[in-house]
Amino acid sequence: MPFTTISVIGLGYIGLPTAAVFASRKKQVIGVDVNQNAVDTINRGQIHIIEPDLDMVVHAAVTEGFLRATTKPEPADAFLIAVPTPFKDNHEPDLGYIESASKNIAPVLKKGDLVILESTSPVGATEQMAAWLAEARPDLTFPQTHGEDSDIRIAHCPERVLPGHVLRELVQNDRVIGGMTPKCSQSAINLYKIFVQGDCIVTNARTAEMCKLTENSSRDVGIAFANELSMICDKLEINVWELISLANRHPRVNILQPGPGVGGHCIAVDPWFIVSKTPEQARLIRTAREVNDSKPQWVIDKVKVAVADFLQSNPDKTAREVTIACFGLAFKPDIDDLRESPAVEITVRISAEHAGQVLVVEPNIKDIPQILSTKTKLDSMQNAINEADILVLLVDHKEFKGMIEDASKIYVDTRGILSSL
Ligand code: SAJ
């Protein structure tokens, strides 16, 4: 069945680009979000998030009349749910947004509709979503009870795009399609083929859920290995970046890069969805999370040692007279996204605990986040280099890469910027 109208529930980092790309293929797209401000912004042809080129695509989609946002779901032929799936305090997944999205779209569902869960989800979430929909609409049939004959088709198709490259990856990446039945999968393929140029590979919903969690856990474990190596090498007085580049010359070794910790809203979260379902089996995955989460504290301890070393070699000075400069706040290089950034966490702690001045350099933002605004200020790179006694390198932004080491200063280089020369 052709999809004339497509509704995307949740207009965030995944939902909005997805809605805009469907609209760019001349489909009628209804975007739904609980955030009135986001809805109003989009309806003006603007965007409330940062992603390269997305502003142009959304502007074109809205002005040409293919994309419209609203806070209240309306009937459509396909619904894509792209709402957040955070975890609770105990690292248990919080499906509250999926539950309320399901309950909101249920009244407008009709026979023949397709519902796709795109949010990164713990295993079983798609079945749970189907149960919420069935409960709200006893007049319709669903795949969990009526198999291939169901009125509503349901699938899990996890998003896998890299922030900063979303528009390209949405179109080019392969798509894992986990239908609750083969017909559900086929219907989802027909939908994605409207814009996806990559392969659409069919599996079941549970495997699709686990696939997304596995991809991000695999990266988390890889980064944890690099971070653990960095702490081992520090003890053994070995340059970890040189070590990794040497080891990576082996044809079957490919070690990732250490850093100040793992940020963003995906890799630091998703592995917990595996751990919470299978705590006894997921030992390595849990430990990787713990290793990566411990890295910011390790960096803060290194900065404290640097201050003590500086004071020892400058006995005429007090801590109040020591200037620290933190380079980078974003959660990874060359973006302005500060969410869940270990660099922010470290800078906040340093500025709270250090008696002297703390300068912050972040070329990708204009305003310092409120959490830092009382004790620090954004500074130019050159001024911070000149003023600082201790330089803490937290993000390998391209602007920082040519930084030349000054023997009179102390560096805490969490990204190997000085080693890359
Ligand atoms: N990091 C390191 N060392 C590395 C690589 C990354 O410390 O060698 C750190 C980064 O600095 C950052 C964090 O890890 O703080 C995560 O960055 P990332 O580039 O690995 O991933 P994200 O969070 O931007 O996007 C990931 C991607 N997943 C994988 O690459 C397996 C993306 O494809 C997913 O769609 C996205 O998560 C998501 O939405 O789940």
Image (tube, grey):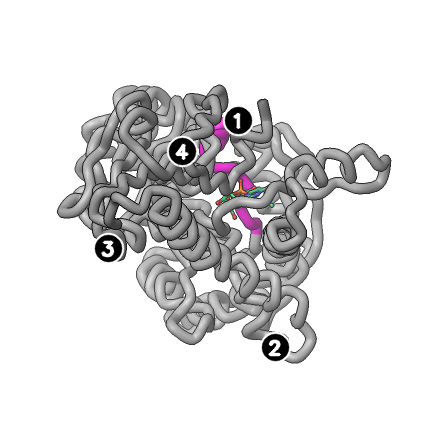
The label on residue 352 is 3
Residue 408, image quadrant: top left
The label on residue 117 is none
Q: CA distance from mark 1 to mark 2?
A: 36 Å
- Inspect the image, locate mark 2, and give the three-letter code of the amino acid beneath it: Pro
Q: CA distance from mark 1 to mark 4?
A: 42 Å
Q: Secondary structure at mark 4?
A: loop
What residue sits right under mark 2 in the picture? 279
Q: Which secondary structure is most common in the magenta stretch? A: loop
Q: Residues within 10 Å of mark 4 (few under 14, many from 20)?
A: some
What residue sits right under mark 1 in the picture? 168
**Residue 165 magenta-highlighted:** yes
What residue sits right under mark 4 in the picture? 409
Residue 327 position in % (x across, y down): 37, 35
Asked if the residue at label 2 sits under 8 Å from ligand 1, the reply is no
Q: Nearer the viewer, residue 364 or 348?
A: 348
Point out the stretch of residues depicted in magenta: 157-168
Q: Nearer the viewer, residue 135 or 272?
A: 272
- Inspect the image, locate mark 3, and give the three-letter code of the amino acid beneath it: Ala
